[in-house]
Image: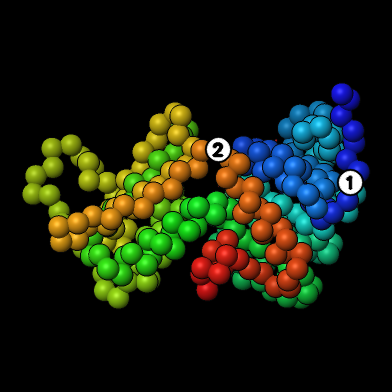
């Protein structure tokens, strides 16, 4: 069957970036009722369209042109931290609501986005983790941390992930520390025969980063107490796991004004 050019109705979503995250999430969004993918911006390649399922979506070489020509309601920003602000501010200046999936947006940039959303009376979302399960795990870990003085986080990702530890692991440790009245305690080993074998440490919590082909995104938080352990674990089997969170974020950006930070806030888990 010959693919048709985009022409449905619903929330008009333009997508900045078409890498691992954006390509899978865009396919997922296109299959959700009430969303229409009206444009995709990526720099590399010569094609004027990109196939998303059975539909051909207009492809733009730069985000500014895409915003002007595709007339989206929402810009899903999934490029790199150094471009996220420029794209999001350009969207707001054109009356388009940004949903920033790109991770690594600084606190100062968050404040600027907050002001820009307020000035324009538009909604916007910054969600560095769109996985509902991962966000629920962080929330549960923060609660469990109140009752255990000892904890380790083990995060597992594909071997080519550039950074370690994952932003999710660091944020989990931060939330656990914030929720706990008192600090976590790490007992050092008297003898260490392999350097770094005990992993790193943040807020008194051990963090271990596993990098192997075949993994997607997985995290375990293990708590230790007198005569017992408690293990919380989340496994993302594919980037499809980001689609429900992206739908929630896009709808929220459409229905509210002002900037909302974190999927946990949208789910009522974080303040
Ligand atoms: N929120 C979440 O749950 C979540 C989950 C996974 C990843 N992330 C974050 O999302 C971001 C993207 O991750 P990824 O794994 O998809 O990375 P990736 O595979 O490297 O994709 C980045 C994409 O951005 C495009 N791009 C870069 N600069 C651009 C520009 N100025 N204009 C238009 N397109 C541009 C790149 O394509 P061209 O070079 O062809 O332009 C590429 O398609 C990262 O910040 C990552 O940490 C967030």
**Label 2, label 1: how far apart the Cα atoms are:** 27 Å
Q: Is residue 158 left or right of residue 230?
A: right
Asked whether 102 or 225 is in front, the reply is 225
Q: Is residue 7 left or right of residue 238?
A: right
Ligand 1 image-quadrant field: top right
Residue 144: percent from the left, percent from the top?
Answer: 33, 64
Q: Is residue 173 left or right of residue 67?
A: left
**Quadrant in the rendering for residue 104:** bottom right
Residue 63: percent from the left, percent from the top?
Answer: 78, 48
Up the image or down, 199 lies above or below 138; here it is above
Dot 2 falls on a residue whose secondary structure is loop
**Which residue shows up at 67% across the image and 59% down it?**
249
Dot 1 falls on a residue whose secondary structure is loop
On the question of residue 162 being in view, the answer is no
**Which residue shows up at 75% across the image and 54% down it?**
75
10 Å crowding of disc 1: few (<14), some (14-19), many (20+): few
Are the residues at dot 2 and dot 1 in contact (C-beta closer than 8 Å)? no
Asked whether 46 or 252 is in front, the reply is 252
**Which residue shows up at 44% across the image and 56% down it?**
137
Q: Which residue is mark 2?
A: 238
Q: Which residue is mark 1?
A: 8
Mark found first going from the N terminus, 2 or 1? 1
**Quadrant in the rendering for residue 97:** bottom right
């Amino acid at each position: 069957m010959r693919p048709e050019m985009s022409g449905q109705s619903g929330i008009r979503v333009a997508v900045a970036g078409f890498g691992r995250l954006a390509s899978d999430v865009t396919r997922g969004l296109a299959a959700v009722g009430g969303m229409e993918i009206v444009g995709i911006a990526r720099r590399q390649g010569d094609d004027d369209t990109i196939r998303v399922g059975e539909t051909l979506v207009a492809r733009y070489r730069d985000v500014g042109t895409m915003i002007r020509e595709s007339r989206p309601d929402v810009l899903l920003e999934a490029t790199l931290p150094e471009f996220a602000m420029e794209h999001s501010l350009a969207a707001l200046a054109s009356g388009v609501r940004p949903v920033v999936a790109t991770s690594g947006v600084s606190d100062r940039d968050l404040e600027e986005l907050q002001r820009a959303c307020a000035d324009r009376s538009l909604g916007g979302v910054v969600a560095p983790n769109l996985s509902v399960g991962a966000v629920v795990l962080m929330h549960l870990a923060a609660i469990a941390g109140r009752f255990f003085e000892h904890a380790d986080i083990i995060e597992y990702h594909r071997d080519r992930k550039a950074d370690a530890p994952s932003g999710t692991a660091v944020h989990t440790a931060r939330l656990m520390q914030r929720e706990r009245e008192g600090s976590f305690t790490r007992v050092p080993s008297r003898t260490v025969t392999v350097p770094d074998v005990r992993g790193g440490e943040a807020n008194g919590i051990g963090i271990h980063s596993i990098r192997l082909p075949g993994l997607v995104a997985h995290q375990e938080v293990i708590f230790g107490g007198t005569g017992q352990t408690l293990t919380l674990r989340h496994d993302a089997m594919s980037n499809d796991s980001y689609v429900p969170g992206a739908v929630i974020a896009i709808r929220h950006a459409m229905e509210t004004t002002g900037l909302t930070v974190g999927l946990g806030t949208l789910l009522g888990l974080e303040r």
